[in-house]
Image (cartoon, grey):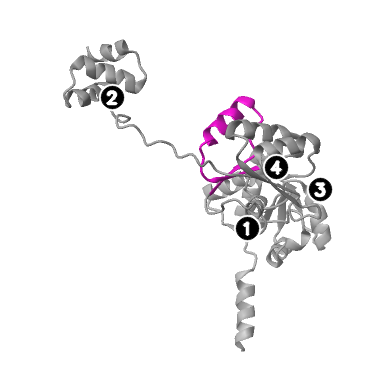
Amino acid sequence: MSSVKKTEIAAKEKNRVEAGTLYLVATPIGNLADLSERAVKVLSEVDFIAAEDTRNSMRLLTHLGISKPMVSYFEHNKRERGEQIADRLQNGESCALITDAGTPAISDPGEDMVALCAERNIPVTSVPGPVASIVALTLSGLPTGRFTFEGFLSVNKAERRERLSELANERRTMLFHEAPHKLQATLKDLCSAFGGHRRIAICRELTKLNEEILRLTLAEAVTYYESQAPRGEYVLVVEGSSYAPAAAAFWSDLDIPAHVAYYMERGMSKMDAIKQTAKDRGLPKNEVYQTMV
C-alpha cells in the first residue's frame, strides 16, 4: 500500500464520527464558503443535530444538501432539552450542536450542554471554525496579545454601570457584542465609563458583503452614530486602559493597631501615630483612637 493511501486512510479514521459523542460544530458567521470540509462531514454523519434556531439551521443544511433529524436547543429550553440530548448521547447516538452563527458555547447556551456532558462523562469534541469576536480582534488594529471577551453587556442599568466601572482600568483589549438597536446607547455608556479618547474598532457584518470596520475614538463613534442608523450585528473592540494603578499602600495588609504600631516603632508618639494612621486611611481620628483603647 502506498504512503499516500495510508495517509488517506488514517485521515478518514481520525475524522470518523464516533457514537455517543457531542460535536460542537462551528458554522459561518456570514460567508457560507467558510464552512469546513470536516464540519460538512460531521453534520452529514451524526445521528441528529441540536440547533439554536432549527429554521435558520435548516436553511444551511438545505444549502448543503443534508437531511438530518433536528431538535431545538436554546436559552429557554436548555435545562429540559439538555437532559434529553445527554440521555440520547449516553444511549449511543451522536449529536452535532450548532448555533445560529459561529462557534457554539461562546455567549451561547451550548456552554451548559458541555458542562452537563462533563458531569456525565460524555465525550465532547470541537469542529473549529469562525468566531466573530476573534475575527473582529484581528481586524481592529488594536493590540491582540492580551484581550478579554465580555460578550453582551447586561440590559440592567445598575449591573451595566457596575461592570463598566470594573473595566475602566482594564489594560487588555476588550471585546463586546452588540445588537443594532442598542448600539448607540452602548457607545454612550462606554464613552462615559472609559473616556472619549479611548480607541474603538466597530466591526459590522463580518465576512458578509457589507462588512465594515470603523476605527475611531469613542467620542467620534458616538457622534458618527448620531447621524448614521446602525444596521447589522456588531462586535466592538475597545482599547485597554493606559492607566497603571498605583502600588498598594504599605499598610494595606495591616489592621489599625499594627498600622499605629508601625509609626510608634519609628519614633512617633502614640497620639501622632494615631493621627497619621487616621490620615492614611481617611478615617476620623477618634475612630482610630477607639480601636486602640
Q: Residue at x 18, y 21 (%)?
A: 268
- Look at mark 4 in the image and give the residue it sits on: 74
Query: What is the distance, in whole Å, between disc 3 and disc 1 at their CAs?
Result: 26 Å
Q: Nearer the viewer, residue 242 or 125?
A: 242
Q: Which residue is mark 2?
A: 255
Label whose residue precedes the other's in the sequence (2 or 1): 1
On the picture, is 241 further left or further right than 17?
left
Mark 4 or mark 2, earlier in chain: 4
Whichever of callouts 3 and 1 sits on the residue coming sooner in the sequence is 3
- Tags 3 and 1 touching, CB below 8 Å: no
Q: In this view of the protein, which residue sits in the foreground, 188 or 174?
A: 188
In this view of the protein, can residue 20 be seen by the observer? no
Q: What residue does disc 1 label? A: 92
Question: Is the Cβ of the residue at disc 2 closer than 8 Å to that at disc 1?
Answer: no
Calculate the distance from the C-alpha at mark 2 to the C-alpha at mark 1: 60 Å
Label 3 or label 2, whichever lies nearer to me, is 2
Q: Nearer the viewer, mark 1 or mark 4?
A: 4
Q: Looking at numbered disc 4 in the image, what kind of residue is underneath it?
A: Phe
| Label 3 element class | helix
Element class at badge 4? loop
Q: x, y (%) of residue 103?
A: 66, 53
Helix, strand or loop at label 2? It is loop
Q: CA distance from mark 1 to mark 4?
A: 23 Å
